[in-house]
Image (cartoon, helix red, strand yellow):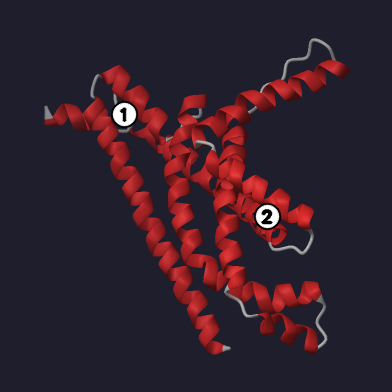
């Protein structure tokens, strides 16, 4: 029985390790592609929510309310099927009969990105509120404009304050990538599901999937710790 398990987990023609390794690659690639998108949108939404312009604050609050309130899976379906339908209708106006398909990787990246950004905006907003107003005034007093003050004075402090919260969101993002298996993307969970269905060894392959996600989380924790130490050293050297 043990040898049969090792055969199923081998790289050979009867094993599934190659397929699962590809799923790991897809999962990590999706998470890494989603991260900058989510951070950028989250930062912009946080700026909007603390703006003096009421319409920007309202738009930012509506954005976070919607994407924090909707289940992640429903957001994924809305992006994958809804965006595909909308684009299809627009294309039909200019080129009747042309079929449009949304790439599942792109759909997953966008859906997870907007969900991630809605939570990241709250982390950034809390970090902004943790920076004293005097930091802005100090930047202006030495001749920096708003953009320079943000880049040179505020952003370094913002990153340090927001880093723990963003680290938690990254770990949540890694787990949320499992949702893309429902739209056909060959991530860890989908490859494990296929292997379990074909071999009838569900416990084995779902157990392997659990271990892989735990290993990714542990590696991420070490990486986050290294980043926090590097940021802390920079602050001490200033």
Q: Residue 45 carries which label?
A: 2
Residue 172 in view of the camera: yes
Q: Residue furthest front?
A: 54
The residue that appears at 50% across and 36% down in the rendered structure is: 71
Q: Is residue 134 above or below residue 227?
A: below
Q: Residues within 10 Å of mark 1 (few under 14, many from 20)?
A: few
Q: Judge whether 119 appears above or below 126 on screen.
A: above
Instruction: Tell me where residue 225 appears, x and y as whole percent.
Output: 41, 68
Q: Residue at x 54, y 37 (%)?
A: 70
Return the residue at label 1.
12
Q: Which residue is found at the position 63% from the left and 54% from the top?
A: 42
Where residue 220 appears, x then y in whole percent? 41, 57
Label 2 or label 1, whichever comes before in sequence order: 1
Residue drawn at (35%, 25%) of the image: 193
Depth check, front residue: 153 or 207: 153
On the picture, is 95 further left or further right than 68? right
Residue 75: image quadrant is top right
């Amino acid at each position: 029985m043990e040898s049969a398990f090792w055969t199923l987990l081998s790289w050979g023609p009867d094993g599934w390790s190659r397929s699962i390794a590809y799923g790991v690659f897809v999962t990590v690639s999706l998470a890494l592609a989603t991260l900058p998108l989510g951070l950028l949108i989250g930062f912009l939404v946080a700026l909007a929510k603390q703006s003096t312009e009421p319409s920007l604050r309202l738009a930012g609050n509506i954005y976070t309310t919607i994407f924090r309130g909707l289940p992640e899976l429903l957001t994924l379906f809305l992006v994958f099927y809804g965006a595909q339908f909308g684009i299809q209708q627009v294309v039909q106006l200019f080129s009747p009969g042309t079929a449009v398909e949304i790439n599942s990787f792109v759909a997953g990246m966008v859906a997870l990105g907007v969900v991630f950004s809605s939570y990241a905006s709250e982390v950034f907003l809390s970090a902004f509120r943790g920076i004293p107003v005097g930091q802005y005034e100090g930047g202006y007093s030495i001749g920096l404009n708003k953009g320079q003050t943000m880049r040179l004075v505020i952003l370094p402090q913002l990153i340090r304050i927001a880093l723990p919260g963003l680290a938690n969101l990254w770990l949540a993002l890694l787990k949320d990538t499992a949702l893309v298996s429902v739209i056909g993307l060959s991530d860890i969970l989908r490859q494990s599901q296929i292997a379990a269905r074909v071999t009838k060894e569900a416990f084995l392959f779902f157990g392997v999937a659990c271990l892989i996600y735990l290993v990714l989380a542990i590696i991420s924790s070490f990486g986050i710790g290294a980043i926090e130490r590097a940021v802390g050293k920079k602050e001490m050297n200033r």
